[in-house]
Amino acid sequence: MSTARQIEQHLPELYERDYYAWTQQQATMLRSGQISGVDALHLAEEIEDLGRGEKRALASRMIVLLAHLLKWQHQPALRSKSWQQTIKTQRKDVTYELGGSPSLKTSLTEPEWLDIVWSKAALLAFNETGLDIEIFPEACPWDMTDVMHIAWLPE
């Protein structure tokens, strides 16, 4: 049996047994052009998961941003520089995420994604404020262009 065939047969086993070693082996094989020996099925899954991770990072930033905008709107007496700084930082981080993966911009207009992000933001605002959950709208009332504008704050 050829060495390439032996490697091919052991790749799924290595993936399950030692993920780090598998990643290093895959990178080495790709760099050296040994495409036929690559564990294509697992590699494709891992690449897809990297993309999902980017989308989760964007969602996480948006959740914090939207929660702080809700706090800003519903607790005007408690507004602080800290909240302003968090809003500013999250906007910059979202912009950074979108700059690195421009195709993620479509997420900001995907109704299903926005519903999930909004519900998590409302829950975070509820947990941090102690306000009645019912005061927060069921869906995001703001346009994403406004949300991302550097100077915009809900009143």
Image: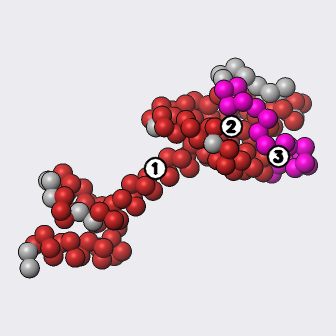
Q: What residue does disc 1 label? A: 51
Q: What residue does disc 3 label? A: 138
Tell me, for residue 21, which label it has, or none: none
First along the sequence among labels 2 and 1: 1
Horizontal relation, residue 60 to residue 136: left or right: left
Tag 2 and tag 1, C-beta contact below 8 Å: no
Q: Residue furthest top?
A: 151
Quarter that holds the N terminus: bottom left
Query: Dot 1, how many residues are within 10 Å of its Cα: few (below 14), some (14-19), or many (20+)?
Result: few
Q: What residue does disc 2 label? A: 65
Does residue 115 lie above or below 88 as drawn? below
Coordinates of residue 53 in the picture (x, y in percent): 50, 51
Q: Is residue 61 visible?
A: no
- In three-dimensional space, the C-alpha distance between marks 2 and 3, rounded to whole angstroms, equals 17 Å
Give the magenta part as a residue range: 125-146
Query: Is 127 one of the magenta-colored residues?
Result: yes
Horizontal relation, residue 100 to residue 90: left or right: left
Residue at left offset 62%, top offset 31%:
91
Q: Residue furthest left?
A: 2
Q: Which amino acid, mark 2?
A: Leu
- In three-dimensional space, the C-alpha distance between marks 2 and 1, rounded to whole angstroms, equals 21 Å
Coordinates of residue 74 in the picture (x, y in percent): 87, 36
Does residue 14 lie above or below 73 as drawn? below
Secondary-structure class at tag 2: helix
